[in-house]
Image (cartoon, grey):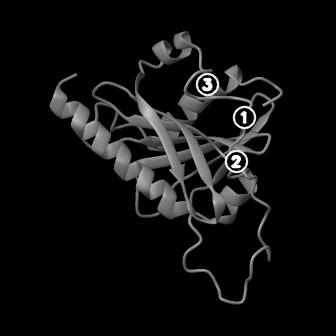
Amino acid sequence: MTGRSKAVRATVFAVAAVVVVAGCSDSGGSSSSGPGKDRPAVAADVPQGFDPCKDIPATVMESLSLEPTSPKVFDGSGGIKWRGCGWVKPSGYTVGITATNLTLGMVRAKGFPDTRDFTIGLRSAVSTRRPDDSEACWVNVDMKGGTLEFLLNNPPYASTSKTDACELARGVAEKIAPSMPASA
């Protein structure tokens, strides 16, 4: 991969990360809702039972043709946190795989269109996309204390651009989630 394409991918991933933080912030809320009202409790930190930077088997990542980029650490409003790593499919999509203290209920509560519930093995999962960003898709897989989140960005210049971002994200999640221990 050339230095230019690495820089483009890093920029794309950084923009996608900003979308995550913006999409999950609580801005624009009603002034009549105070702390704790109609809000699920947020865990103080991300789930500790699975580290997406260290615990995904190399054989799984090789089967997906994904190459690591760098660790990703984001803190959003309301105590929401993400800890994980970015991955790149050469000439294709980028995907951030993070443990987050966002729960499936919190993800569903955002009310994004095209929200779909499904299961991977025995774990509940949900896919979502923002109405203004068809190139990106989020898949959140249930964990104790939060979710394992996959943010996939499939830009129009990618070799994978003819495939729907949520289809790709779900495929990545279906390969990786089975490596999570039952205790996570």
| Mark 2 residue type | Asp
User: Is 95 above or below relative to 37?
Assistant: above
CB within 8 Å, label 1 to label 3: no
Which residue is located at x 71 percent, y 25 percent? 180
Identify the secondary structure beneath mark 1: loop
Which residue is under mark 1? Answer: 48
State whether residue 130 appears in this view: no
Which residue is nearer to you in this view: 181 or 81?
81
Which residue is located at x 58 percent, y 64 percent? 77
Q: Is residue 47 left or right of residue 27?
A: right
Which residue is located at x 60 percent, y 23 percent? 175
Which residue is nearer to you in this view: 175 or 74?
74
Which residue is under mark 2? Answer: 45
| Mark 1 residue type | Gln
Image label count: 3
Q: Residue furthest bottom?
A: 32
| Mark 3 residue type | Ile
N-terminal-most mark, 3 or 2: 2
Which residue is located at x 75 percent, y 58 percent? 42
Residue 90: quarter of image: top left
Which residue is nearer to you in this view: 36 or 152?
36
User: Is 109 above or below relative to 28?
Assistant: above
Identify the secondary structure beneath mark 2: loop
Which residue is under mark 3? Answer: 176
Alpha carbon of mark 2 to alpha carbon of mark 1: how far?
Answer: 8 Å
User: Is 78 above or below relative to 61?
Assistant: below
Assign the C terminus to one quadrant of the image: top right
Assign the N terminus to one quadrant of the image: top left
State whether residue 158 appears in this view: yes
